Image: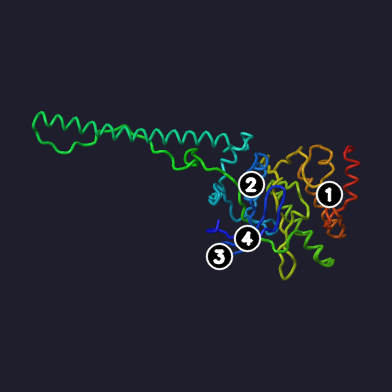
Amino acid sequence: MEELYTLDREVGRGSYGVVFEGHMAKTGHRVAIKRLPCSNPECIELYLQELWAMRATAKNHVNVIALHNCLLQTGSRSLKPLKPGKLPLRLVETVLKGSVLESQKGQERRKVLLNTLRRTNSASRLQDKTNTVLARAKLKGRNRSTGSDSSTPQRPPNRAVKRPPQNEEEQSGSLRCLALWLVMEYCDGGDLNHYLLSRPPDADRNHSVVLQLCSAVAFLHGLGITHRDLKPDNVLVCVTPKDPVIKVADFGLSKMSGVVVNGERCRQHFSSTCGSDFYMAPEVWGGLSYTAQADIFSLGVMFWAVLERITFVEEGTTQEQLGYWFLLTQLKLNAGSF
């Protein structure tokens, strides 16, 4: 890691990973680095969705977080850059099989096989030496009987013995994936909650935030990306001398649709209930089929909270957040009627 990036400090921690502030080793450019441990197939599937969505945006919109690089952690201190356009096939296989590869039993089996190969190789080398000694003794006896002078006998040909792999990764034929590291642009203003609530109300700033959010979501939907977890926590801010620059981030729950009919992208339907309580659309709450329009509902709740500075304190915390708790209560009561 030190050869590519320097980790300075932890700036965020969530259910799936940790985000660090860091610098590029060569240029000193500041970046955000998210470490996603590959501990189970369910988490890995979310990581791959996030990677796929961020690659699709590919730095093409100022209001969507930019992905600079992706690295695979294959050992305690070894990182392997993932080529653009390539997926980590080892992680894809893990998701498809529904179990984490490189399990403890698998590692033990490889160790047994490796030790067996090493013992076989040692035995073969010992047998080679024995054969050479016997051949020399036999040739020496033959020379004595014939009285002829002969040069030193050549080593007899031996059957080829495969060199055992140097390590377990070589033995398995593919690298282990301990974690996925996403290197992204760094936003010094924190998330939208922290940025707006740490400053006095400003109508011009609020309207700028709303317009930028509209632009970002329109761009994502144009690419067939449904975010499914829009909320102030997942909107980052870059501070500038003028208006703040808003960045939509965290695509772990996003879905992509590539179906196009008659030149128009089809509206994909989803059924899984996901997102955050205070911004979730009623059809999502009700367990019904929904589309990318659920993002529009979440966006509307955010607009309301930002423009009117509506806040709440989530149960179990003391931090004030943007949102409308009364709307959540109504959704819970009426979810069955949608």
Classify mark 3: residues with Cα within 10 Å, few (<14), some (14-19) or many (20+). few
Q: The disc labelled 3 sits on which kind of residue?
A: Thr
Q: Nearer the viewer, mark 2 or mark 1?
A: 2
Q: Quadrant of the C terminus?
A: top right
Residue denoted by label 1: 278
**Alpha carbon distance from label 1 to label 3:** 41 Å
- What kind of residue is marked 2? Pro
Estimate the spatial distance between the alpha carbons at disc 2 and disc 3, rounded to whole Å. Answer: 27 Å
156 relative position to 36: left or right: left
Residue 74 spot, x, y in % from top left:
55, 47
Mark-to-mark CA distance, 3 and 4: 11 Å
Q: Is residue 8 left or right of residue 288?
A: left
Question: Residue type at mark 4?
Answer: Val
Q: Dot 4: what SS?
A: strand
Q: Nearer the viewer, mark 2 or mark 4?
A: 2
Q: Are marks 4 and 1 in contact (CB under 8 Å)?
A: no
For label 1, the SS is helix
Mark found first going from the N terminus, 2 or 4: 4
- When the figure is inspected, residue 162 is found, relative to residue 314, above or below; the finding is above
**Location of residue 1 in the rendering, given as x and y in whole percent from the top left corner:** 55, 56
Q: Residue at x 50, y 42 (%)?
A: 169
Question: For mark 4, what is the residue?
Answer: 31
Nearer-the-camera pick, 61 or 118: 118
Q: Which residue is mark 2?
A: 37
User: Which residue in the protein does label 3 denote?
Assistant: 27
Q: Quadrant of residue 273?
A: top right
User: Residue at (21%, 37%) from the top-left corner?
Assistant: 154
CA distance for labels 4 and 1: 30 Å
Q: Secondary structure at mark 3?
A: loop
Mark 2 or mark 3: which comes first in sequence?
3
